[in-house]
Amino acid sequence: MKMMLLQRSFFIFFLISLTLIFPQNAYAQGQSFEDRLPAEIKKSDDAFLTLTSENDNYGSGADQDYTNGIRMTYFKRGMRSPFLVNLADKYIPTFEVNETTSVSYSVGQNLYTPQDTQAAIPNPSDRPYAAFLYGSASFSTLSDNHIDDVELTLGIVGPAALGEQTQRTVHHFLGVNEPQGWDYQLENEPGLIVSWQRQWPEAYATDIDAFRFRVMPHIGATLGNVYTYGSSGLTLQLTPKQFQWQGQPSRVRPAMPGNGFFAVQDNKFAWSLFAGVEGRAIGRNIFLDGNSFEDSPSVDKKYGVADASAGVSLTYGRTQISYTLNWRSREFEGQDDPSIFGAISIGRRF
């Protein structure tokens, strides 16, 4: 009980400290990030198609907990959906519409399994089998020193999310034992998630010889029957100064921010090194709490969860490949070890 209270206090302090400190000190010595961003980037109509695959085989190889996530995102600079943008402008006080406002669309699937996938009847004290199939619309705006992102996700949890079929097909293809306990997965339930996130992309930034180093804090809130949490964290990035206008690779929620944007000339090679941490105060996680309105397997979740990640992006002209290694603290009582998984993203600019 004392440990739980300490965890909650730490994450609340972490959220408040970042909110109070970074926005006040950002850009104290120069132009805003919006003013510094070249006009050709702000007005660019480039489109980005990014495929992201997250899997524990890219990390620990454990094949448990959050075992697989895949997401395809289409993002175009300046693309707008009038209905969604106007809705956000009207009902979200922190969201502002301007010439940088853009919309992106994603589809994806997440899979979750217990530690022992060969047991016909899963251990009731371990994470239940679950899958989430979804589509998302996300819109973002750069204003002064910060970027606001709002994402609306609609999907389905349960057998209709096709988690069993996906994992059995992949295991059969790889020639490994197929999981046995999917009959005990969460029941079908529509999923709704609304997420808001604010990032200060150069709260601290400096040139080090031919390189650009920046510190990018962020805060966020997510509401829904699938996830409800508050988050706060920061990302460190090092790039060649010549190719400093590179965002973070696209990731699967919940994760640290990234939209897959990069501005590198054709036939030019660039790279980016990044690392980050994030703390989340969890109100609801359907993959641990179980279904909202009917009996289902569940475990006692932890109310504070932390992520730490590090990775590299390699870009040649219009193509970017990224790898991120992610460590996630224990998410429920009785979980033996933290989760370690990797993310591979392949992005193409059109």
Image (cartoon, rainbow, N blue to C red):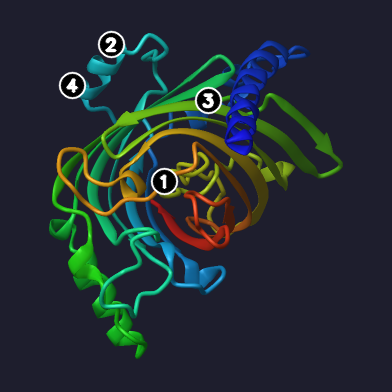
Q: Secondary structure at mark 4?
A: helix
Note whether residue 249 is visible.
yes
Q: Which residue is mark 4?
A: 83
Q: Secondary structure at mark 2?
A: helix
Q: Earlier in the sequence, mark 4 or mark 2?
A: 4
Q: Which residue is mark 2?
A: 91
Q: Are marks 4 and 2 in contact (CB under 8 Å)?
A: no
Q: Which of label 1 and label 4 is nearer to you?
A: 1
Q: Say which mark, if any, is on residue 300.
A: 1
Give whichever of 60, 78 is nearer the camera.
60
Q: Which residue is mark 3?
A: 39
Q: Earlier in the sequence, mark 3 or mark 1?
A: 3
Residue lying at the far bottom of the rendered structure = 175
Amino acid at pointer 1: Asp
Amino acid at pointer 3: Ala
Q: Which of label 1 and label 2 is nearer to you?
A: 1
Q: Is residue 216 left or right of residue 120?
A: right
Note whether residue 195 is visible.
no
Residue at (48% x, 67% y) in the render: 56
Q: Secondary structure at mark 3?
A: helix
Residue at (56% x, 14% y) in the render: 144
Expressed as whole percent of the image width and height from the top left, the position of residue 192 reads: 23, 35
Expressed as whole percent of the image width and height from the top left, the position of residue 54 reads: 44, 61
Expressed as whole percent of the image width and height from the top left, the position of residue 291 reads: 22, 44
Q: Is residue 4 left or right of residue 298?
A: right
